[in-house]
Image (tube, rainbow, N blue to C red):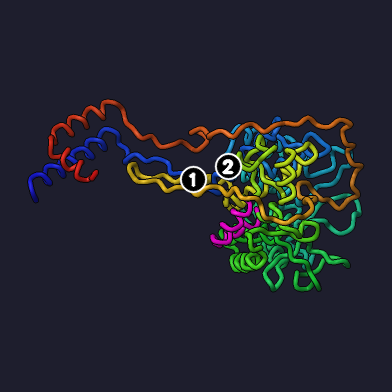
Amino acid sequence: MPLSRRLTTGLGMATVTALAAITGAPPAVVAAPAPAHVTAAREAASWLAGEFTDGSLPGPFAPEDWGLTIDGLVALSATGVDAPTRQAATAQVARHVRSYNSYDDWGIEGFTDGGATAKLLYAAAAADADPTDFGGYDLRAETLSLIATADAGHQRGRITSRTTADSGPDASNTFDQSFAVLGLARSGDLPRDTVDFLIRQQCAAGGFRLYPDAADGPSPSCDDQPGATLDVDSTAMAVQALLAAAEDGATGAGDAARKGADWLVTQQHTDGSFGGSGPTTGANSNSTGLAGQALAAAGRDDEAARAAKALAALQLIAGNGGAASADAGAIAYNTDGFTTAAAAGITDTDRDQWRRATAQALLGLAQVPLGRIGLDPPPTSHPTPTGTASPTAPATPTASPTLTTSPPPTGTAGPTPSVTSPPATPAPTTAAPTTAAPPITTPAASELGGLPTTGAAIGSYLLIALLLIGGGVTLLVLGRRRAG
């Protein structure tokens, strides 16, 4: 080896050895730009966080909508955005468990909604709270007490509601069952019956029906119900719940999840979007968000990326928001909603739809499975060794959205008990004041989990400088040669 190379090699080794001895740390890293869909998800979550007031999101006729607040809490947890708002929302939901899963607030006692209880169980786990002591309630024990037992025949394993009234068929659906599987898997042992009941809601084609009941009562399985309507949203939820069950060791769950993901692929529109069923048949961001999240969870990356692109086309940004630019980050339910907002801003009447759309849509951008929210670090950026070129994130699409029109979603935020509904809360006599979302700011290092430091104490630099000087002109010449 030539003297110059030996000298330089020795100098390099001495420098690395000295740095390691002094700092006790690996080489510094810098953060690469986050993928475009992750950045879009965080911007959507930042807008949604600005819609919270004292830890809750409002409904159209009430200052707090606990179902929507839980959706918002899950969305913020998936992205890691705004820890103070997440903590406040967790505390508020914990204080209002019975406001969400019962009719106690209306003076109707003796009713517990199974689906709402299961959703609370999942939300507590995803928010890193204790589901066995959430606002003083053991949500795991409560959920288990609402699972139909073997004497229920083909309904065994179904999440049900408890009521002292004869209210007819149970109103629980595949969304509720999916939350039960997710929540129980996240909080302890997962009863096999709950998984089996969910699998029975899958038809031979691969999709899942929304309701386990036919017109003449509960049917044993999806295939036993003639003309069962397969639903994108329900399938997306079931796929993610079954993937969590498979991770927990439930046999057959993984195969059912893969079959469900295959069916979702057949329902994807050419622009990457999805529609639901019934009144949500048209392409919309709620269905696209859930389906995209499920496809990412199932490893269908190309299809998940196409769904994310369709969602990004419905997101307000500075370049396309027009009159709604102050609400940059929010995601429209469909093309009509986007176009109307860009022309006239988001009105008080429409803001509720934007909150509901954004909370579910951003899940398809964040692409963290429901079964992993709160367990895996939220997606931010990928560390790259110092001196390595950082990949350039693709720009967020700014073209006009191409989704088709469909009516707003209904009944997705709150419990749907089967007892006679109490009188609706009267609408306020004056319009609610418009609350402008705060500008989107760069998250603090603490919010990102701590950015890596790129330097050491000044004493380290002094010692390294001496070593570099000792290398003399040889290192300088070699450095220039590498630069050329």
Residue highlighted by disc 1: 34
Q: Is residue 139 magenta?
A: no
| Quarter of the figure with residue 79 | top right
What quarter of the picture does the C terminus occupy? top left
Give residue 456's position: percent from left, percent from top: 32, 31
Give the residue drawn at x 92%, y 42%. Answer: 423
In the current view of this chain or complex, which residue is farthest to the left?
3
Give residue 285's position: percent from left, percent from top: 68, 52
Locate residue 325 relative to residue 418 in the image: left or right.
left
Q: Which residues are magenta?
A: 289-312
What is the three-letter code of the residue carrying label 1? Answer: Ala
Give residue 157's position: percent from left, percent from top: 73, 61
Q: Is residue 298 magenta?
A: yes
What is the number of the mark on residue 90? Answer: none
Report if the CB atoms under discs 1 and 2 are less than 8 Å apart: yes
Q: Residues within 10 Å of mark 2 (few under 14, many from 20)?
A: many
Give the residue drawn at x 81%, y 44%. Answer: 102
Locate residue 394 relative to residue 92 in the image: left or right.
left
| Quarter of the figure with residue 353 | top right
- What main secondary structure does the magenta stretch of the protein show? helix
Give the residue drawn at x 16%, y 31%. Answer: 469
What is the number of the mark on residue 42? Answer: 2
Locate residue 395 relative to residue 196 in the image: left or right.
left
Q: Residues within 10 Å of mark 1 (few under 14, many from 20)?
A: some
- Dot 2: what SS? helix
Compared to residue 324, the image places residue 232 above or below, namely: below
